[in-house]
Image (cartoon, grey):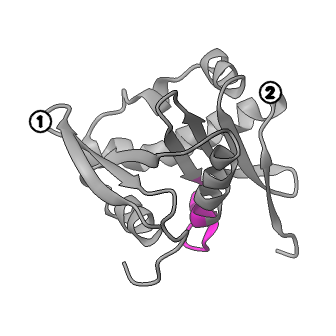
Amino acid sequence: MGMSVTISAADEQDAEQILKLQYLCYQREAELYGDYTIEPLTQSLAALKEELTRGRVLVARLGTEVVASVRGSLDDEGVAHIGKLIVHPRMQRHGLGGRLLSAVEEQLRGDGEVQRFQLSTGHRSEHNMRLYRRHGYAPAGSQRIDDALTLITLTKDPEAPAFMASA
């Protein structure tokens, strides 16, 4: 490609590209669970712009194109919530998701004292589970949403290594 991917904070001008990428990336999840009404596929541009004003939203760019994104926020109890980690299908399996995950963790550490990192994924999302485990996350609970979906909550101690080779 000749260009390197850069990671930076998102701004309002990125909102439309993030939303389009989110729609593309969550098609696989929707198919996996047989539900095309999941929030990432129904989120409005206005709602996404609102998210940009609170917490952290990072993007990875290849040139001017947004090819990946992640969101995070730190609550009053010190729980750093991470969500909507998305990577364009053509950019997957090159370590970009892990780079974004590490970057948002670092940003959230700068927002205050992190007691633990927390994220969720569907029980059938094996690729997501492997990525999170490689980065030190462990299952901490589950919540059955309906017959097709159980959300698995994973947590990580803020002192855990950023990347674990054998997971």
> Could you tell me the amino acid type at mark 1?
Asp
Residue at the disc numbered 2: 12
Q: Is residue 9 magenta?
A: no
- Residue 93: in magenta span: yes
71 horizontally vs 59: left or right: left
Is residue 166 shown left or right of residue 17? Answer: left
Circle nearer the N terminus (1, 2): 2
Q: Please report the bounds of the magenta region as a residue range.
A: 87-98
- The residue where tag 1 is placed is 147
- Badge 2 density bin: few <14, some 14–19, many ≥20, Cα 10 Å: few
Image height of 12 relative to 69, above or below: above
**Alpha carbon distance from label 1 to label 2:** 37 Å
Placement of 24 over or under 160, stated as above or below: above
Residue under the point 43% across and 27% down: 39
Which of the pair 6/110 is nearer the observer?
110
Q: Quadrant of the N terminus?
A: bottom right
